Amino acid sequence: MEAKRDDLTRLLQVQDIDLEILHQKKEFDELPQREQIVSARQRKEAIEEKRAKVATLKKEIERKIARVGDEDASLVKKQQGVQAALDAAKGDYRNVEARSKELAGIMKRRETLEGDMNRLTEELSKAEVVLGQAERALSDVAAQEEEAVSSFQQIGGKLKKEMADSQARRDAILAEVDPALVRAYEKAANRTGGVAIAYLQDNRCGACRSLIESGRLIELRSQAPLGTCPHCKRLLIIE
Ligand SMILES: [Zn+2]
């Protein structure tokens, strides 16, 4: 293939830049912040789900507490009424007995309610503790997410700028090269996904290191200064 020495030197420069871009792209794709952000968001969702469950439970407990409180308040009134009736029923043995029984029933029910109230109050404070823990965990995870996002923007942004700079440098160099050579280079680069051009080193391809047998070597040398490796099809510079 016909090629000017300067163009081959330029292609080698472009190849160096392309390998640099590949490295930058890999680094960008593998930034650990991506996984950190995803993991923080998953944890946030799990905590929010738990918080919602406990909040529902807390409301339920509060409703029960209100019911117990209402019932007890109405029993207090009833108790006062029965007590007044009892006080007024002096001497009326049957009435006293009936009122006393009624009063004992009310007291018993109020005792049960007191036990319920204690248990519910304890449940409520437990739910409040869990809610507080969830709030703290959420704010921790939000801080971690924010940190990962800002670090991603900073490092990822820097890498993207470096890639754009590299791209601009390669495009500027390629603008000077014979378009047919550029096409051959791009084709080889796309196919190999890495090194596209190398030197012929004695009787070996400088890229794939394959030995090139004498018949093919003679043919290759006749293509100087630029041929194609018969094994890997990369461009070979023949000096
Ligand atoms: Zn080769």
Image (cartoon, helix red, strand yellow):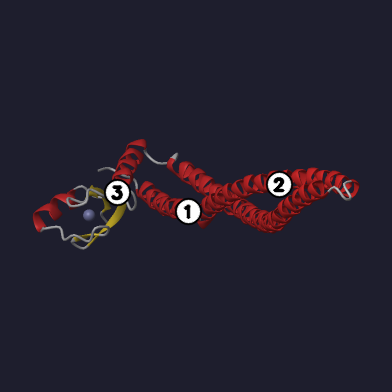
Q: Residue type at mark 1: give it.
A: Gln
Of labels 3 and 2, earlier in sequence is 2
Instruction: Give the side of residue 93 with respect to residue 185, left or right.
Output: right
Which amino acid is tagged 3?
Thr
- Residue 239 in percent (x, y) is at 27, 56
Question: For the view shown, which residue lies furthest in the top direction?
Answer: 179
Closer to us: 173 or 114: 114
Alpha carbons under labels 2 and 1: distance apart: 57 Å
Label 1 and label 3: CA atoms lie apart by 18 Å
Give the residue furthest to the bottom.
Answer: 202
Residue that badge 2 annotates: 62
The residue pinned by badge 1 equals 24
Label 1 with label 3: CB-CB less than 8 Å: no
Q: Which residue is mark 3?
A: 192
Label disc, if present, on residue 83 of the rendered structure: none
Query: Does the residue at mark 2 contact the one at mark 1 (Cβ under 8 Å)?
Result: no
Q: Position of residue 84 (x, y in %)?
A: 89, 46
> Which is more foreground, mark 3 or mark 2?
2
From the top left corner, tell me how far across and down residue 9 is, in percent. 38, 52
Mark 2: few, some, or many residues within 10 Å (few <14, many ≥20)?
some
Residue 3 lies left or right of residue 42; in this view the side is left
Q: Considering only vertical position in the picture, is 137 above or below 77?
A: below
- Looking at the image, which is closer to me, 210 or 33? 33
Mark 1 crowdedness (10 Å alpha carbons): few <14, some 14-19, many ≥20: some
Q: Position of residue 24 (x, y in %)?
A: 47, 53
Secondary structure beneath label 2? helix
- Quarter of image, ligand 1: bottom left
Mark 3 close to ligand 1, CB under 8 Å: no
